Image (tube, rainbow, N blue to C red):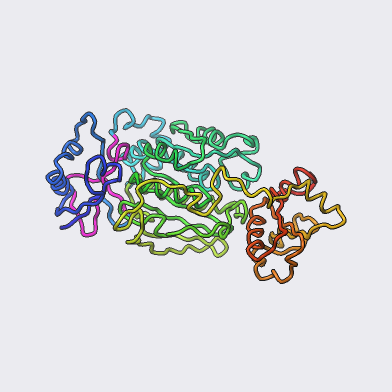
């Protein structure tokens, strides 16, 4: 039967072969033989012997949403795809010294060893696995805790932020005494208490196009614990170029989403979102809020998907999107097929390198400052409000936020602003404000496009006002 073989971009380039090949075979061994006959330079890759200068590779079989370790005698079924994994893949890593469990580990993981689908072999797979978690926050916290407890051998953590008081409502890796500490260090201390056998690799940086291809290759699978579109597209594209799966998770207020993306044999994130939404249309947790328990649910599901992928058991969410509504306590599953026109995983790949993802998402690139004439500082605003001709002050937050704390302002939520422009005088001086300055900046652009000339917004929002003018104002 005809079976497709996928190579990660970097291996395809190294071997001088296409990323996708089709051979006729009934077993994995026959498929590899056909591949090596067609491309003799690949023979050394699959000989099972180490050769200087040649990459270490492994073979996986994708069957539906499952990933199966391949053996030469393994029969192929209709719809199977063979995936060639690059150095560091689970199937390619020799057992060696890390292929044994100590007596203490045997006891620690005894409840895993009792499960036939896991057992000793599965626990060794977990010990040999290398998982990267991008974001040590709401989603990364439960995912890291459960993966460490499960015995994943190496956990990498990427996060450039420090622990803040507002994190503690949901980011259970961190505690009261961790405020001000780097999140990766706080997380490492907690995870070491959970399981001292786990090797922790800390990356106290923001994941960017410049460092992603240096960090990701060392890991087998990536978990997305981020809360912004640029980083999510970056993870997707980097994993696609490297031939790695990543577990997607997203949360907002009372709702969450989970899926598994793998550009080699299934859909990727671009199949779900071909283009990013306009800036500001979808607020992050810092602006829109999230119920504290929700990331625990979604992050745990992400950890579950990673464990299934490592163990090669069950059916992963590859090709499916799982939606969760906390208020209704309802799960909804949607089919998520690969988009044939996708520039990363479609029939004709057009993405061959990483790009400027903040610019791609329509955000202000790093280093490019906002127009300073659009901003007004808290002290400057205080002087204007005390003057004989104060500006019209507009609060663009929601009513429930207005009740927490507010300035002497008119409340016009950002979502209502386009329909209420007729209430405003285009010739009057106007100052907008919100919680941190994000929504007020969007409102300013809206008013400018409508012809308003004398518009500014409060730099840093109420957070800055509380810091510089009124420390008694509640900060949330």
Q: Is residue 154 rendered magenta in the image?
A: no
Measured as percent of width and height from the top left, residue 200 is found at: 46, 33
Measured as percent of width and height from the top left, residue 36 is found at: 15, 43
Give the image quarter of residue 265: bottom left
In this view, 254 is above or below 29: below
Left or right: where 203 falls relative to 98: right
Measured as percent of width and height from the top left, residue 104 is found at: 41, 30
Q: Is residue 67 rendered magenta in the image?
A: yes
Give the image quarter of residue 440: bottom right
Quick one: 383 or 186, which is closer to the camera?
Answer: 383
Residue at the spot 76% in from the left edge and 54% down from the top edge: 405
Measured as percent of width and height from the top left, residue 109 is found at: 41, 38
Q: Which residue is outermost to the right?
A: 388
Residue at the spot 37% in from the left edge and 36% down from the top edge: 218
Start and end of the magenta stretch? 66-93
Left or right: where 178 falls relative to 7: right
Q: Main secondary structure of the magenta part?
A: loop
Quick one: 251 or 52, which is closer to the camera?
Answer: 52
């Amino acid at each position: 039967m005809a079976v497709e073989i996928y190579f990660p971009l970097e291996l395809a380039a190294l071997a001088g072969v296409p990323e996708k090949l089709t051979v006729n075979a009934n077993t994995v061994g026959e498929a590899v033989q056909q591949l090596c006959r067609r491309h003799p330079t690949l023979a050394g890759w699959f000989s099972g012997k180490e050769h200087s200068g040649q990459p270490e590779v492994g073979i996986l079989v994708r069957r539906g949403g499952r990933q199966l370790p391949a053996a030469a005698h393994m029969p192929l079924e209709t719809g199977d795809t063979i995936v060639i994994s690059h150095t560091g893949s689970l199937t390619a890593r020799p057992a060696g010294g890390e292929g044994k469990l100590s007596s203490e580990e045997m006891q620690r993981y005894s409840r895993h060893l009792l499960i036939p689908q896991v057992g000793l072999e599965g626990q060794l797979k977990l010990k040999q696995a290398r998982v990267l978690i991008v974001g040590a926050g709401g989603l990364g916290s439960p995912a890291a805790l459960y993966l460490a407890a499960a015995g994943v051998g190496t956990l990498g953590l990427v996060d450039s932020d420090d622990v803040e008081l507002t994190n503690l409502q949901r980011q259970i890796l961190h505690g009261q005494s961790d405020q001000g500490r780097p999140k990766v260090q706080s997380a490492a201390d907690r995870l070491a208490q959970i399981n001292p056998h786990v090797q922790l690799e800390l990356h106290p940086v923001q994941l960017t196009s410049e460092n992603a291809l240096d960090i990701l290759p060392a890991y087998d699978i990536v978990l997305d614990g981020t809360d912004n579109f640029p980083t999510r597209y970056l993870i997707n594209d980097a994993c696609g170029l490297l031939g790695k799966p990543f577990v997607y998770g997203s949360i907002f207020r009372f709702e969450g989403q989970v899926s598994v993306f793998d550009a080699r044999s299934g859909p990727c994130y671009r199949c779900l979102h071909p283009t990013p939404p306009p800036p500001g249309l979808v607020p992050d947790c810092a602006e829109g809020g999230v119920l504290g328990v929700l990331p625990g649910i979604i992050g745990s599901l992400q950890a579950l998907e990673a464990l299934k992928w490592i163990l090669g058991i069950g059916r992963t969410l590859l090709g499916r999107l799982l939606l969760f509504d906390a208020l209704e306590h309802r799960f909804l599953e949607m089919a998520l097929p690969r988009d044939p026109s996708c520039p990363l995983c479609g029939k004709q790949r057009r993405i061959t390198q990483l790009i400027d993802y903040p610019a791609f998402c329509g955000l202000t690139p790093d280093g490019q400052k906002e127009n300073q004439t659009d901003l007004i500082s808290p002290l400057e605003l205080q002087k204007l409000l005390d003057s004989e001709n104060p500006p019209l002050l507009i609060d663009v937050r929601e009513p429930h936020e207005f009740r927490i704390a507010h300035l002497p302002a008119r409340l016009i939520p950002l979502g209502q602003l386009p329909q209420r422009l007729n209430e405003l005088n285009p010739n009057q001086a106007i100052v907008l404000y919100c919680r941190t300055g994000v929504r007020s900046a969007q409102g300013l652009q809206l008013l400018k496009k409508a012809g308003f000339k004398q518009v500014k917004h409060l730099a840093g929002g109420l957070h800055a006002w509380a810091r510089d003018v009124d420390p008694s104002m509640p900060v949330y």
